[in-house]
Image (spheres, rainbow, N blue to C red):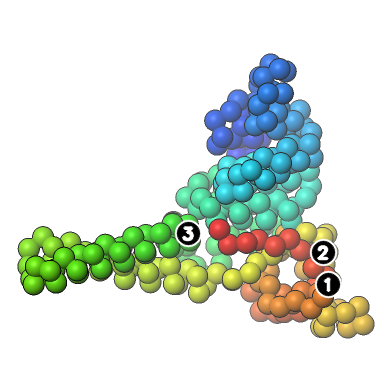
Amino acid sequence: MKARPILAAACLGLLIGRGAVRPAKAAEADPFARAAELYASSDYRGAATAYASLLEARPRSAALHYNLGNALFKDGQLGRAIAEYQRAFDLRPRDRDTRYNLDFALKRAGEELVPPGVPPFIHYLFHLIALRELEGLHWLAAWAALLLACAALLRRSAAGPVGWWGAGALAAWIFFGGWWAARAGIEPAERAVVIKPTAEIRSGPGENFSVAFTAPEGRRVEVLSENGRWMEIGLAKEGAKGWILAESVERIARH
């Protein structure tokens, strides 16, 4: 994995504007600096705990998810690291280091960020904007189009700037709405990552069912259904599905 995004970035308190090298008192007063200091001293598990604690107050911080992923990766927890990188990517898909580290970690699990047969540039453009950002742009364009339509009705004419702006807002509404719908339709509603070294996938929800196949740590899966301690999952790459113990995976909620 790149030393820049994995080592230097976290050591500098990546993306959160904090330096890792601080006096002891400053590090104690600043939890961000303390987490970076733990990482710099190779206490990756301690750094992971510190970043996880910070995330409790800022669950939508892409930088914290990314830094936590770095610490987990260095601690040897590939599955949990991929889960954090995925959360960071969902929140900030344009970040180059996040894309690189997620792809690097996924390759360790026998997967890639860009699906086979998809041009990387097309994949980049399709995921250029976060899903929540697309939703916001869709509704912003929708309200703009409706307000301009009301203005045209009150004027009893769509000629002039009102008509031009209205047409532009309508086009943006259709464009962003279609993009949002396409992303929401392609991306699984419920996702998870295998966090056990080798997880057994069974043909049914119970130990009495035969093992259909195994999934390596770090493999991303789609959650299809649940039955007690068991979860039915699907693996897009293999086109297979089966049942796994819920404790063997970590869920990833949509941001």
In the rendered image of this protein, does residue 170 appear above or below residue 6?
Answer: below
- Residue 88: x, y in percent? 58, 50
Disc with the residue nearer the chain's start (2 vs 1):
1
The quadrant of the image that shows the N terminus is top right
The quadrant of the image that shows the C terminus is bottom right
Is 132 or 77 nearer to us in this picture? 132
Amino acid at dot 1: Arg
Is 71 or 23 nearer to us in this picture? 23
The image quarter containing residue 190 is: bottom right
The image quarter containing residue 43 is: top right
Dot 1, crowdedness within 10 Å: few (<14), some or many (≥20)? few
Q: Is residue 102 left or right of residue 24?
A: left
Residue holding disc 1: 229
Residue holding disc 3: 132
- Disc on res. 247: 2
Q: CA distance from mark 2 to mark 1?
A: 8 Å
Residue at disc 3, secondary structure: helix
